[in-house]
């Protein structure tokens, strides 16, 4: 018995549409949101430092 891995044209196209128009955009939105949250936190830390506030982080 031979196992043939073949997709119909519709299944292949539908799979690519799901990957490139659903999964990748969701991943990118999550990464962009994470980067914005990180930069907002860093900005707040910088403002606290300029105001002479105490560091809340310990390395």
Image (cartoon, grey):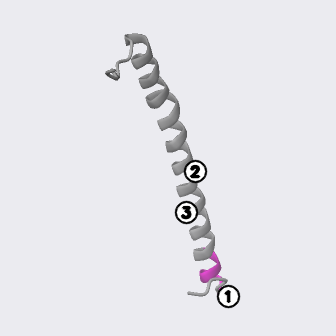
How many C-alpha atoms fall within 10 Å of the one at disc 2: few (<14), some, or many (≥20)? few
Q: Residue furthest front?
A: 1
For residue 15, the mark is none
- The quadrant holding residue 17 is top left
How many C-alpha atoms fall within 10 Å of the one at disc 3: few (<14), some, or many (≥20)? few
CA distance for labels 2 and 1: 27 Å
Mark 3 or 2 closer to N-term? 2
Where does residue 41 sit, x and y in percent of width and height? Answer: 61, 67
- The quadrant holding residue 44 is bottom right
Rendered view: 35 above or below 48: above
Where does residue 56 sit, x and y in percent of width and height? Answer: 67, 83
Helix, strand or loop status at disc 1: loop
Helix, strand or loop status at disc 2: helix
- The reply to whether dot 2 and dot 1 touch (C-beta < 8 Å) is no
Mark 1 or 3 closer to N-term? 3
Where does residue 35 sit, x and y in percent of width and height? Answer: 53, 57
In the image, taking residue 39 as reference, residue 1 lies left or right, namely: left
CA distance for labels 3 and 2: 10 Å
Where does residue 47 sit, x and y in percent of width and height? Answer: 62, 75
What residue do we see at 31% from left, 21% from top? 2
For residue 33, the mark is 2
What residue do we see at 49% from left, 26% from top? 18
For residue 39, the mark is 3
Residue that carries the numbered disc 1 in the rendered image: 54
Most frequent secondary structure within the magenta stretch:
helix
Mark 2 or 1 closer to N-term? 2
CA distance for labels 1 and 3: 19 Å
Helix, strand or loop status at disc 3: helix
What residue do we see at 34% from left, 23% from top? 3
Quadrant location of the C terminus in the rendered image: bottom right
Q: Is residue 40 magenta?
A: no
- The residues colored magenta run 47-52
């Amino acid at each position: 018995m031979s196992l043939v891995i073949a997709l119909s044209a519709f299944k292949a196209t539908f799979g690519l549409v799901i990957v490139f128009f659903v999964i990748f955009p969701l991943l990118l939105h999550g990464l962009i949101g994470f980067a914005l949250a990180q930069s907002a936190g860093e900005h707040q830390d910088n403002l606290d430092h300029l105001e002479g506030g105490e560091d809340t982080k310990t390395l």
